[in-house]
């Protein structure tokens, strides 16, 4: 009782209530630590609004998802009809459904931009490695949430998209068929699959997602926010211990974010009300047809936010894997003999090189050079066929992001102080990522396959050779304090 605060006799009812709460829960303390007394760099720009927008969309998805589950029926015989019931008969059901479906795409838009901002300004670098890892884990959970939710409307693309993706797991040697059976819950995509996907979509994955978001925010407020200059503001503090280049997050950046939220909601609502399908990218037209196991659509492709990785999957061939294994080998040589990296980066690249070269490139090339072409081909048929390597490439494209803090060996964090050709390299990377996304949404073609293969090699080359190219060039001096112009 001695530690309890006592409200003054002339305090208002609201102040007395807040004092009562503070004596039992640290509401004011949490607000000060994470808002009014959390000092953020004063030179934030537009790139720093996407984290707040991602949190907004997450809350919106949870709220709209709750209302949708009130009327949705996870039954293969009733699922499609229940979605149509929501759209046609439930008051404002069409709006809730479109908010949720458009929100899924909006989530990936802001998350992709949020991650790219980190890449631009080095927000994944020391001391924010764990913060970046939490962010990548959130990205993985988001992909799982989107994949499980994609099946729930039980339309043609939902059914056949799930059929294709789940069957990919069957390519894993030894455990593949059992793993695919475990995911489906049956020998074909059916009622059991729909039920377990529904359970994962509304309970398991959201719980993990919310926990990781909380961990991400706690880690961010522990180490502090990065800024466009890549300067640690905690290094320069005043006599009161506050960063000289920091300002309280509230009210300065809450107002900043409210403006960004207003602009975002205008664009978001325009799409919801006037183009919720967004030309078939947000809601595929085939998904307005009930799932039919006996009629395969002419072209099966995932939603746009999965298409870059799907394009890598389709582009994976025997020849491309040979080139990629050579690329990984080159990265290992550069890492060991030229870049003088730390042990973590050396270990990662050397392990990746050993795995690819020994399992695929080295063994196959050695057998082929000895004239044992048949044995070289049987090496693949023994469990490492192109389909399996496609799954490996698709998974590795996401998992390699976890190692970015150790792959990036640039002497400076921010793109502002890097050589001009670094920016050009980033532009090439972004171009091919968009190209992979577009080609993954199109029917397969021979020219498109070649471009996808080049794009896949560019994607992996960008990261695997980063310990080498990120050190090259002439770097501008980084200021001791952040650069800021009042506006």
Image: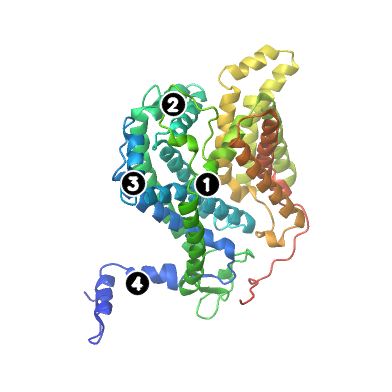
Whole-angstrom CA distance, mark 3 to mark 4, is 35 Å
Residue labelled with disc 4: 28
Q: Earlier in the sequence, mark 3 or mark 2?
A: 3
Residue at image x 54%, y 57%? Answer: 128
Residue 205 position in % (x across, y down):
39, 43
* x and y percentages locating residue 365 in the rendered image: 71, 22
> What residue did someone put label 2 on?
180
Residue 341 higher or lower than 165, as above or below: below
Q: Earlier in the sequence, mark 4 or mark 1?
A: 4
Quadrant in the picture for the N terminus: bottom left
Is residue 340 in view? no
Number of residues whose C-alpha sits closer than 10 Å to that of mark 1, classed few (under 14), some (14–19) or many (20 or more): few
State the separation of the CA atoms marked 4 and 1. 43 Å
Mark 1 or 3, closer to the camera:
1
Q: CA distance from mark 2 to mark 4?
A: 50 Å
Q: Nearer the viewer, residue 61 or 206?
A: 61
The disc label shown at residue 68, or none: 3
Taking the spot 45% from the left edge, 44% from the top edge, the residue there is: 141
Name the residue carrying label 1.
278
């Amino acid at each position: 009782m001695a530690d309890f605060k006592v409200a003054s006799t002339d305090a208002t009812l609201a102040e007395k209530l807040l004092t009562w709460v503070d004596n039992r829960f640290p509401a004011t303390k949490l607000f000060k630590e994470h808002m009014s007394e959390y000092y953020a760099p004063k030179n934030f720009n537009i790139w720093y609004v996407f984290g707040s927008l991602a949190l907004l969309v997450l809350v919106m998805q949870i709220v709209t998802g709750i209302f949708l589950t009130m009327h949705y029926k996870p039954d293969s015989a009733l699922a499609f009809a229940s979605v149509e019931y929501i759209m046609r008969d439930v008051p404002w059901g069409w709006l809730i459904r479109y908010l949720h479906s458009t929100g899924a795409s909006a989530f990936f838009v802001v998350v992709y931009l949020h991650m790219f901002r980190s890449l631009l300004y080095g927000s994944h670098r020391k001391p924010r490695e764990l913060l970046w890892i939490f962010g990548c884990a959130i990205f993985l959970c988001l992909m799982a949430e989107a994949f499980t939710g994609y099946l729930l409307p039980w339309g043609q693309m939902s059914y056949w998209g799930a059929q294709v993706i789940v069957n990919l797991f069957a390519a894993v040697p030894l455990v593949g068929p059992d793993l695919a059976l475990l995911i489906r819950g049956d020998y074909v995509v059916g009622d059991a699959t729909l039920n377990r996907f529904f359970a994962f979509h509304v309970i398991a994955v959201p719980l993990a997602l919310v926990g990781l978001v909380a961990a991400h925010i706690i880690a961010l407020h522990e180490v502090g926010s990065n800024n466009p200059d890549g300067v640690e503001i905690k290094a320069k503090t005043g006599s009161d211990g506050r960063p000289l280049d920091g300002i309280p997050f509230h009210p300065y950046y809450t107002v900043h974010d409210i403006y960004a939220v207003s602009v975002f909601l205008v664009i978001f609502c325009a799409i919801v009300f006037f183009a919720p399908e967004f030309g078939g990218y947000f809601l595929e037209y085939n998904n307005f047809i009930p799932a039919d196991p006996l009629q395969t659509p002419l072209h099966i492709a995932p939603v746009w936010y999965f298409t870059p990785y799907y394009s890598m999957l389709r582009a994976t061939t025997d020849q491309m894997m040979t080139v990629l294994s050579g690329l990984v080998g080159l990265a290992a040589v550069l890492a060991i003999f030229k870049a003088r990296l730390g042990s973590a980066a050396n270990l990662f690249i050397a392990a990746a090189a050993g795995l690819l070269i020994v399992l695929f490139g080295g063994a196959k090339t050695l057998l082929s050079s000895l004239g044992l072409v048949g044995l070289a081909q049987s090496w693949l048929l023994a469990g490492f066929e192109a389909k399996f390597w496609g799954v490996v490439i698709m998974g590795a494209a996401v998992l390699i992001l976890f190692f970015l803090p150790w792959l990036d060996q640039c002497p400076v964090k921010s793109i502002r102080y890097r050589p001009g050709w670094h920016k050009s390299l980033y532009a090439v990377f972004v171009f091919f990522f968009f190209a992979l996304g577009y080609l993954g949404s199109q029917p397969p073609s021979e020219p498109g396959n070649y471009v996808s293969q080049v794009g896949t090699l560019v994607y992996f080359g960008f990261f695997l050779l980063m310990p080498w190219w990120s050190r090259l060039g002439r770097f501008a001096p980084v200021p001791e304090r952040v650069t800021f112009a009042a506006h």
